[in-house]
Image (spheres, rainbow, N blue to C red):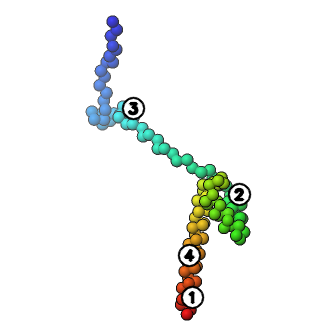
């Protein structure tokens, strides 16, 4: 017959017994927090790529087409940062033309 091994009972001093006893994190019921799930980030857009992007945006009519393609065409592989920038540019462009159209309509009404 085999006997189960019993560890001898050793009373450990804790801060409750003696406030000057140093405790280890292993002696407490401390659990390490589980790491949060990391969200994958888009790769960095370097200065050269931003330079090319802004150069394309200086060309009239090409800039409109390029912004819409970068923003809404999923078939073309575009960095997510650049895609979000193109969406913001298109939104600002639409808002600008809405405000300009409203101002022109108000000017025509007030002119009469």
Q: Earlier in the sequence, mark 3 or mark 4?
A: 3
Residue name at image x 37 percent, y 36 percent: 30
Residue name at image x 60 percent, y 56 percent: 81
Q: Earlier in the sequence, mark 3 or mark 1?
A: 3
Q: Are marks 1 and 4 in contact (CB under 8 Å)?
A: no
- SS for callout 2: helix
Q: Earlier in the sequence, mark 3 or mark 2?
A: 3
- SS for callout 4: helix
**Which mark, residue 108?**
1
- Label 2: how many Cα within 10 Å (few below 14, some 14–19, many 20+): few
Q: Are marks 1 and 2 in contact (CB under 8 Å)?
A: no
Q: Quadrant of the C terminus?
A: bottom right
Quadrant housing residue 104 = bottom right
Residue name at image x 30 percent, y 35 percent: 15
Q: Are marks 2 and 4 in contact (CB under 8 Å)?
A: no
Circle 4 residue: 98
- Label 4: how many Cα within 10 Å (few below 14, some 14–19, many 20+): few
**Which mark, residue 48?**
2
Cα–Cα gap, marks 3 and 2: 51 Å
**Which mark, residue 26?**
3
């Amino acid at each position: 017959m085999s006997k189960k091994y019993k560890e001898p009972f050793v009373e450990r001093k804790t801060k409750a017994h003696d406030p000057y006893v140093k405790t280890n994190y292993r002696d407490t019921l401390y659990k390490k927090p589980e790491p949060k799930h990391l969200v994958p980030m888009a790769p960095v857009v370097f200065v050269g790529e931003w330079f090319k992007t802004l150069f394309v945006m200086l060309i009239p009519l090409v800039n409109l087409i390029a912004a819409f393609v970068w923003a809404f065409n999923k078939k073309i592989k575009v960095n997510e940062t650049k895609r979000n920038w193109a969406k913001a540019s298109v939104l600002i462009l639409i808002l600008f033309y809405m405000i300009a159209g409203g101002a022109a309509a108000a000017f025509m009404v007030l002119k009469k």
